[in-house]
Image: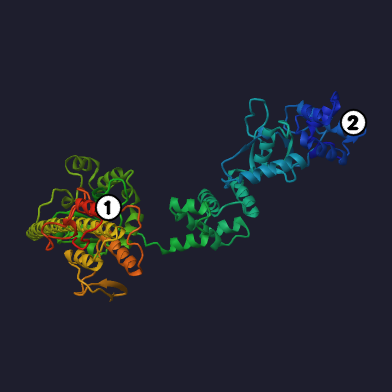
Amino acid sequence: MNALTPLAVSAESLLRAIQAGGFTSNSDLAAKAGRMAGNISRDLGSLEKEGLITRDPLALTPAALAALEALDRANGVTSVAVDANAVRPPEGHAHLFHRQIRIGGFNPRKKFDKAALEELSADIAERGLKTNLEVREADAEPDAEGLAIHQLVAGERRWRAIGLAIERGDLDRDFPILVKVEAIDDAAHEIGALLENLQREDLTPLEEAEAFERIMKRNGWNTAQMAEKAKRKSREFVQQRLRLLKLTDVEKRQMEDGQLTVHDALKRIAARPKPLELTTAEALMLGEIVVYLGSANNENTTPSWWQAADCAAAIEADPLAAALVGRGLLAIEGPTAWHFHHQVKLASHDAWSQIKVYMPGVFGPEGRDTALLAIQASAVGADLAEQANTEERYLTPWLNGPFELTPEGQAFVDAKAEKEAADAAVAAEYQEKQAIEYAERKAKQHAAGAEGQAFLAAVRNFEFRANVAIADGLAFDFSGHLREALEAFGFKGPFKVALDGDALVLNDVEGKLLAWAPGPGFEALRRIQALALNHALGAPLFTGPDLKAPTDEVEATPDDLDDGEGLEDQDDDDYAEADDQGEGEGDES
């Protein structure tokens, strides 16, 4: 039986703490062993179950002593493998420390789930390593400790998990890892790493694509040969994965984040326009136009396919521009009422997409000028391109402003100026009319306010006189005085209810609406209605809290009203005299 079991190795610190003794409790034992106190009972139970300790008393068994002796021998030598008399590895295998294993550049897997890695690390620390790692034969040069270094072929995820356990202190730094040693070259190493991950389905589709492409280039294979080496993968599978490399960087990030499926990614690639075939002159003109469109609209954005920009009228006579229009790549517009110069733009979204695939550098705001200079240099040479950029930015002459107006464009400018002048005159006339109407409206409001105030003053005077006369037992022609007060302000009885649309209203005999806008006039009408109702019911005419005699602050009926002799002509002195005599003519108000 092998004395160096995985549990004995992972629990070495605990076994040595038990062997040393001197602890007073399980918590003290956990502290001396560098273990978690909350897990100590479980750890002791695992050791007892495997026959490494006894619990009463707590002591090591011969199996545990043998395991510690084997670990001592392993730690005391500089070779890679543990001493054969202690723990003999199987043929073709060896025991290596974690630090003796290096990750090579051939593993296609780049992303590791952190939570899953932590879970695997805890499992290895508790139950040991169940599946061996695979490494290449030792490198020619040992490390600083004199230990042989091996390149990892398969098992990077397990190797990383062991490293995490060592960092946490769950495994000793010299924890021996059983590995299978393979005598392979770089090509076989790369194939082996790919096959292991394909079998475990640990790779993302993009990682598979990148691995296929790298191996095929290294070995000069076609897709059929790659499929044969990959095993259980068809040629169509390899071809589909390789197509994913045509995705943009943004689309690749979407795939990695789970926002884009393989199916949808392949559909996008299939729907893309066919690659453009352009002459050097055509590429120069289109590249300059794209840069010009981006610069003319916004220096910091990518031009949209529908954006246009002014250019010289000479574009109409340029045969190369006409050829690009004929190919459906370019569109030219003459002057219009909205833009007065000729304008150039890309013909369609398809044209925009094709050109962007052909020369992506000229579309982005970053590096746009560098890409433009490269296109110009390829067309006319670097020296002429530099000279052109010093004098004029573009080698296409009708892109360099300023642009002169054609007679057609000037006609649109003149028409716009005439229209703007006519619109300004109409606007001025309208503003003047609005000002007059506003002044008239304010005057009417002022007059209505003054009239309403006078109406309220007359009603308040009427209230006071009527209540005083009735209180003193004097005769008072209520109906006559009320009629006079209403007529003085344009209302003539008798009054009747009428239907105005969906509303019931009160009109006088001439159909005039008995109403007033909110304010003094409205209050006067409400007071008259209360007086009339109280009079009809034989109730006190006025019982409110604000009955008061007329004062100088309450204006009488305006002088310009027809009734110059109303209730307001008589002042408080008349009633003072009537009170003294006990009699008076109450209807002469």
Quadrant into which the C terminus falls: bottom left
**Is any atom of residue 220 visible in this view?**
no
Closer-to-camera residue (77/252)? 252
Q: Most extreme residue toward the top, as rendered?
A: 22
For label 2, the crowd category at 10 Å Cα-Cα, with few meaning under 14, some 14 to 19 and many 20 or more, is: some
The location of residue 297, given as percent across then percent down, is: 25, 50
How far apart, in angstroms, are the residues tagged by discs 1 and 2? Answer: 82 Å
Say whether disc 1 or disc 2 marks the residue closer to the N-terminus: 2
At horizontal 71% and vertical 41% (from top left) the residue drawn is: 122
Q: Quadrant of the N terminus?
A: top right
Q: How is the image coloured?
A: rainbow
Q: In the figure, 221 relative to 372: above or below?
A: below
**Residue topped by disc 1:** 290
Front one among 341 and 515: 515
Q: Is residue 357 visible?
A: yes
Query: Which residue in the protein does label 2 denote?
Result: 59
Q: Amino acid at mark 1?
A: Val
Horizontal side, residue 380 vs residue 90: left or right = left
Q: Amino acid at mark 2?
A: Ala
Label number found at residue 278: none
Q: Camera-side residue: 492 or 540?
A: 540
Residue 285, compared with residue 322, is above or below; it is: above
Residue furthest to the right in view is 56
